[in-house]
Amino acid sequence: MIQIPLQIIELEHKNYHILIEGKFEDGTSACWIIDTGASKTVLDSTLSQFYETIASDNEDDYQSAGINQGMMETSVGKMFNLHFGDLEISGQKVALIDLSHVNEIYGKYTSYRIAGLLGSDILMDYKCTIDYSRKIIQFQIE
């Protein structure tokens, strides 16, 4: 089991986001929103140095809808190596979306730049547990 510290950010009153910090293979830090409601992991499409675009075997799997916005333009990529502490995730298939609108909101309240949303595909694969009181996430590795 790998335990990683979390940041719990209150963007507005009673509006919480859970962040985890990772590092790309070149050492670049990357903040991720843990999004238990996202079916797929999302990477900011502007971070092209950290993924390769791939053809989707099922385009419907990677369509994204925002709660306040209709369907968002999405493509599919394979992410290069990403580390959360001792956990290395490589070759993860991700939805590629321009997250400028997310980073604009974060920029108003914090200094964090969001690289992506950690979705339930990864959370389920690693049987993740979020402990709010201890502010950690646990990844099960086999």
Image (cartoon, rainbow, N blue to C red):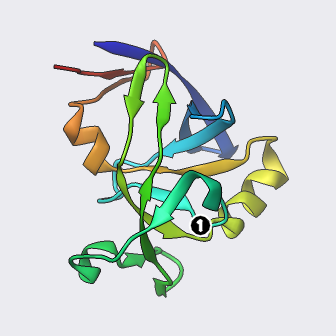
Indicate left or right for 40 with 66 as reference.
Answer: left
Task: Classify 141 as above or below 61.
Answer: above
Task: Classify 89 as above or below 3.
Answer: below
Q: Position of residue 62 (x, y in %)?
A: 33, 73
Quadrant holding the N terminus:
top left
Q: Position of residue 63 (x, y in %)?
A: 35, 79
**Extreme bottom residue here?**
70
Q: Position of residue 47 (x, y in %)?
A: 65, 58
**Which residue occupies the foreground of this view, 59 or 18?**
59
Look at 53% across and 78% down and name the residue there: 68
**Which amino acid type corresponds to the residue marked 1 in the rendered image?**
Ser
Q: Which residue bears the numbered disc 1?
A: 45
Look at 69% across and 46% down and name the residue there: 11
Indicate left or right for 80 with 39 as reference.
Answer: right
**Extreme left residue here?**
142
Indicate left or right for 130 with 84 as reference.
Answer: left
